[in-house]
Amino acid sequence: MEINWDLIPLFIGFGVIQGSIIALGAIGLSLLFKTVNFINFAYGDSLALGAFIVWQLNQVLGGWGVAEVPNIIISVIVGLALVGLIGVLFHKYLFRPLGSANPLVMLITSVGLAFILRNALLFIWGREPKNFLLPSQQGLH
């Protein structure tokens, strides 16, 4: 089997992008643990909620935005703000009142929130994979 060496930099770039996405989630989880001193098991589901909000906004806004700004950028900014606000509300009304409770109570609460978020995502958006509306670019052949 012959190796196409021209594609190696492209594959390295894709690997760096995928690794950066995973690292972003890991850094966020680490920062959350350091600030509130408990592991929030709903963190990954909150990330998924943010992704679905961005996808939904992208579907509503369409492919391209105003003044040559792709709507994906607008969707990401609004989605980050919304999921950040939701996270603040979870902390203020769910986790902060339990701050002096047994750590096991915090753990069970975060697991319960994770189940609620995951099932809400499945109920609202279903199980099918979602694709973002992006401006078409030349594909690799």
Image (cartoon, rainbow, N blue to C red):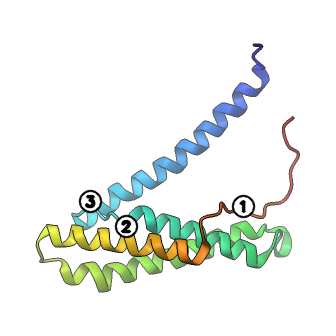
Task: List x then y, in percent, for residue 52.
Answer: 59, 70
What residue is drawn where x is 79% and y is 68%?
69
Task: List x then y, in percent, for residue 62.
Answer: 80, 73
What residue is drawn where x is 43% and y is 61%?
44
State which tag comes first along the sequence, 1 or 3. Answer: 3
Looking at the image, residue 33 lies above or below residue 123 = above
> What residue type is disc 2 on?
Ala
Looking at the image, residue 5 lies above or below residue 95 = above
State which tag comes first along the sequence, 2 or 3. Answer: 3
Task: Indicate the quadrant containing the C terminus: top left, top right, bottom left or bottom right.
Answer: top right
What residue is drawn where x is 30% and y is 70%?
110
In the rendered structure, find residue 34 and report the number of the disc placed on it. Answer: 3
- Residue 88 quadrant: bottom left
Mark 2 and mark 3: span between their CA atoms? Answer: 16 Å
Q: Are marks 2 and 3 in contact (CB under 8 Å)?
A: no
Q: Nearer the viewer, residue 113 or 67?
A: 113
Q: Is residue 40 left or right of residue 136?
A: left
Q: Nearer the viewer, residue 16 or 60?
A: 60
In the rendered structure, find residue 77 and report the number of the disc placed on it. Answer: none
Residue furthest to the top in view is 1
> What residue type is disc 3 on?
Lys
> What residue type is disc 1 on?
Asn
Question: Can you identify the residue that label 2 sits on?
Answer: 42
State which tag comes first along the sequence, 2 or 1. Answer: 2
Q: Is residue 113 left or right of residue 70?
A: left
- Looking at the rendered structure, the secondary structure element under dot 3 is helix
Mark 1 and mark 3: span between their CA atoms? Answer: 34 Å
Mark 2 and mark 1: span between their CA atoms? Answer: 24 Å
- Residue 76 quadrant: bottom right
